[in-house]
Amino acid sequence: MADFMQQAVSAAAATAPDWLRDIQSRGRAAWQQTPMPTRKTEAWKYTSLEALKQPFAPGSRNVTATDVSDIRFPALGGPTLVFADGQFRADLSSLELPAGISLVRFEDASAEQAALISAQLGTAVLPHRHVFAALNDATLADGVFLQVDAGITVEAPIQIVWLTSGQSGAISMNQRLLVSLQANSQATVVETFANATTGGTPFTNGITELLVGRGARLNHYRLHLEQGNAVHIGGVHARLDQDSLLNGFHIALGSALKRIDVVVDHQGSGGHCELDGIYLPRDREIVDYHTCIEHSVPHCSSRERFRGIIADEATAIFNGRIHIHPQAQKTRAELSNKNLLTSNKAEVNTKPELEIYADDVQCAHGATVAQLDPSTLYYLRTRGISKEEAEVMLSYGFINELVEAIAEPGLQDYLKPLLARRFSRDSRLTRHLL
Amino acid sequence: MLKIDNLHARVESQAILKGLNLNIKAGEIHAIMGPNGSGKSTLGHVLAGRPGYTVSAGSVTFQGQDLLALETEERAHLGVFLSFQYPVEIPGVSNMEFLKASVDSIRERRGEPAIDSVSFMKQAREACKNVDLDISFLKRGVNEGFSGGEKKRNELMQMMLLQPKLAIMDETDSGLDIDALQVVANGINAMRSPDRSFILVTHYQRLLSFIEPDFVHVLSGGRIVKSGDKSLALELEERGYGWLEDVA
Ligand SMILES: Nc1ncnc2c1ncn2[C@@H]1O[C@H](COP(=O)(O)OP(=O)(O)O)[C@@H](O)[C@H]1O
Ligand SMILES: [Mg+2]
């Protein structure tokens, strides 16, 4: 275990508000019992934690608004909480809340809210399975709590934005979001992680818990826009109650290392989950998505589509587990993972992992790895389109379906040009994409 | 316009074209017929510049230029167009985006600015109407899930938008019912002009009863083994290819 982690754990034990102590000490226990993953750990076989060997300092409180003013994130007009280098920034946030929701930082929680948080926090995560979730528990000092009251529909997307300035060298940040949708409520939550391109090495441990109540509908977006040296290890852990719906969308641009675990646990029958994801590592970047859908009860369905484009000497890992428990009859589960390698040195390790213990289920899965199809490139070129532009069009076309499926129009408008630029910095090659 | 001289070409290591000669003047329509596997599509791809198709001997001159020295897209910029026998499906790239990208690329080489979206939409809708394709096809992925006939009409639409100098139509009539065949024939006839030439690869004389060719050639074993006027097509329809001495 790295020294900086040990220090963070000790420091947190000294400072947490009383009501967070229970979960902290639970986290500490799990953290101490769980060995740090190595390449011999099955779930970390292809993902080296070498990047965590250097020392990381805690986030600085001295970041100014200008330090982060160049970092872009979607402007969607709803309530927005912005953090910079781990610190909440009231000056960058907009906190006008519609009726029927609570949106509060743990630090500012009222006694009543603190009770709600302690009752729910950690209920969607299994820390002994996810050592970085245990670390997140153990170092928990602050976080964001969002609750939508029963029957309330929130139209405006609620945004949580985590920025890192690159001013403070290597810093480590613990980030936590707890979303609780009460029965029959509806909301859209957009999480964005982004950093300044001017250097710095942020290590973020971001854990999100989504509790989707009976009949509730949650659209959840998690945008990993961090680039450069950024390391992010974390995940999203969702618990779905009866007849609820979770629409999840994930995107990860590459950086030094990203490892995201997405766990969806169907705990009430009639639940449905859609999970879309895009990962785009290039240079020598690493992106690792481990997803797991737990079908613990009958009559639930899930559809998962992840697409990756891996360029240069980058590496992607996709592991899609579907676990259908013995009592989960009438489950319908679909998983598709498609990968496009745009260079001979790009690498992907994809593995669908099906564990099916019920007999009356429909389950389909597939994973593909391909390169740009020469006859398709040729066809485009016979129409006068240059090879370079054809490659950009085909790369964008590979993920387009998932981008078009994004329900939040402002987010589509934000992501399209960002993705286009990702495939080419030459605007002449991207002019036909948008 | 196009002069092919003693053309030898290989696909992978297999020799397919073995000394092909063909001379096409501006405004002419040449029909090429011939048994399956004789090299008709190969000829189209060699002219269009398909990677992997190597020319081992001979020359092709297009409007005074050495066509074989040019990249695939450069040939398109000069006005060479190949309507594919098997058009490629491209999920994720909309037909509209594809068409605009190709029109703009060709305009750019002529020193013209990119076409504005409104005028382009208008042209594209008009082109759809001309080939009897619903405009909803503009929004779909290129050829994605199109029927055989729809793909062929999509090829024809591209030809109309790109206004080539030399259009090579590879079995654009195959698999079409009589109404669709009429649409294709009308489209080609409408595009006929003194400075545009066509190569029509076809198996059927029926297309040639709608489009009157200036010459009919029989391609067999990688060479033109017989040339004639439109009456040759009728004769082939009646007698097949067997009576031709050189048919492989
Ligand atoms: N990609 C390829 N690789 C190897 N041989 C090919 C390829 N494409 C075509 N051929 C061969 O080339 C010959 C000519 O094919 P083609 O030009 O398609 O004939 P046609 O269009 O006259 O039916 C055939 O024997 C065919 O099998
Ligand atoms: Mg053919």
Image (cartoon, rainbow, N blue to C red):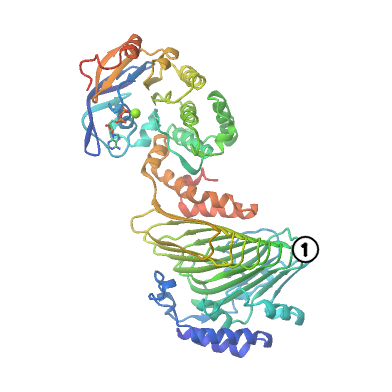
Q: Chain of mark 1?
A: A
Position of residue A262 in the picture relative to residue A426 (left or right):
right
Q: Position of residue A177 (x, y in %)?
A: 63, 72
Task: Tell me the residue at 56%/79% (across/down).
Answer: A136
Give the farthest residue toward the top.
B231
Give the farthest residue toward the right.
A99
Query: Under tag 1, what secondary structure?
Result: loop
Position of residue A190 in the picture relative to residue A196 (left or right):
right
User: Can you say whether A28 is above or below B34 in the image?
Assistant: below
Q: Position of residue B44 (x, y in %)?
A: 33, 29
Q: Is residue A59 at least partly visible in the picture?
A: no
A162 and A19: which is toward the camera: A19
Q: Position of residue B93 (x, y in %)?
A: 50, 43
Q: Position of residue A420 (x, y in %)?
A: 51, 51
A117 and A272: which is toward the camera: A272
Q: Is residue B242 at least partly visible in the picture?
A: yes
Amino acid at dot 1: Gly
Q: Which residue is mark 1?
A: A151
Position of residue A263 in the picture relative to residue B59 (left or right):
right
A149 and B70: which is toward the camera: A149
